[in-house]
Image (cartoon, helix red, strand yellow):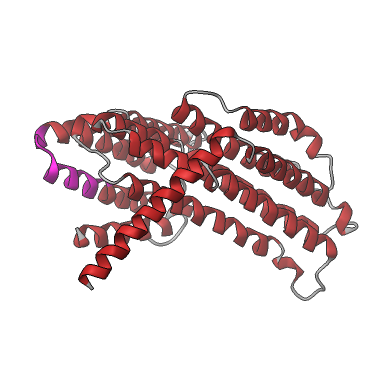
Amino acid sequence: MPLIGAVTVAALFVLNLTLPEAFTDRPGGPSGPLVFVTCYLVLRSVQVLVVLTRADRPGRAALRFGLPRLAAVTLILAAAALPGHQWRHSGWLRVGLWALAVAVEFIAGGRIRSVGLGVVSAAHWAERYALILLVALGESIISLGLGSESTAGRPVSWAVIVASLAGVTVIAALWWMYFDTLALALEQRLHRTRDPDTRAAFARDVYAYLHLPLIAGIILFALGLKRYLAAIAQPHGGPWLARPAELDHRVLYAGVIVYIAGLLALGVRSSHRVPPLPTAAVVALAVGLPAAGRLPAVAGLAVLAAVCVALVLLGRREPAREQVRRTALREQLAAEQEQSEWRRRHL
């Protein structure tokens, strides 16, 4: 397993280097799309190898787990082999092949139980995905600095300071919406799911699938936030009246909408009911999106921060919140007491 981990990290690192050339090759050096698909093939092959070494029926596992991955790699390879700008439809065909590869991967994930994969530790599984989300939120903080880096050589304006505080407020609210109660509730539900197949399906839907909208929403928000801060730091008029570009406000608000919609989907999959607060927030933000584009950038960020803070404060009144948090606290105290007792006896 350490060797497999080292190969995975190496392939993933090179894959990340080629991300800017994954669709279109740049002059000089090896073919970016071809290097990308080769790294992806290595990653998927290592995963299939791990499954085959642990499967009761390797042949069946190879067909059900390995064949879809091979199909996805083949589609991305076909996209990489398309001619560049010589053919005007190559761009759309390339995007279509990538979309089809993604569809194959996700559809294949729906049959994950048939190869005998399961979740042994619910706590470890939930913690890994929570850390991924935490890293994404931390990266959005970096966007604040990248967006206002154009202030170098000039004094920082009050508009940039206020906009930065509004951005941090939104990020803190996004963190609270997930980690205050929902993350605990999802982990507790995964613990209570004893049947291996049902647990694997729940882990796949809630974590492998429905955490992706959360990450995508944070990325969109970070992109919009960076652009907002850049517009405020280098205004054409006064910094308080600087307006974002036509697409920037849509990206900023769309990121928060996608994130909250992901939380809504998590609540529906976990409790089989539609949470009213996230639903109302998504509708309110979607309806107010056109009006937000007409506001100055500082005002648009302030409105978004106010909506997110209001959603957090209203969420504290959820009747199940105290029960979920009380259960998590009792579990933590019990685990610490057990560990302390073991250390007292053996160390």
Residue 68 screen position, x and y as percent: 26, 33
Residue 283 lies in the magenta-colored region: no
Q: Residue furthest top?
A: 273
Residue 57 screen position, x and y as percent: 9, 34
Give the residue at x 72% y 30%: 284
Q: Bounds of the magenta span? A: 44-59
Examine the rendered structure and indicate whether residue 330 appears above or below residue 164. Answer: above
- Horizontal side of 196 relative to 25 (left or right) equals left
- Horizontal side of 162 relative to 5 (left or right) equals right
The image shows a total of numbered marks equal to: 0
- Horizontal side of 95 relative to 56 (left or right) equals right
Give the residue at x 68% y 39%: 311
Give the residue at x 90% y 58%: 238
Examine the rendered structure and indicate whether residue 176 appears above or below residue 102. Answer: below
Give the residue at x 74% y 54%: 166
Nearer to us in this view, 188 or 149: 188
**Quick one: quadrant of the N terminus?**
bottom left
Q: Is residue 85 visible?
A: no
Residue 190 screen position, x and y as percent: 36, 37
Residue 319 screen position, x and y as percent: 58, 33
Examine the rendered structure and indicate whether residue 44 appears above or below residue 11. Answer: above
Examine the rendered structure and indicate whether residue 347 appears above or below residue 224. Answer: below
Nearer to us in this view, 127 or 235: 127
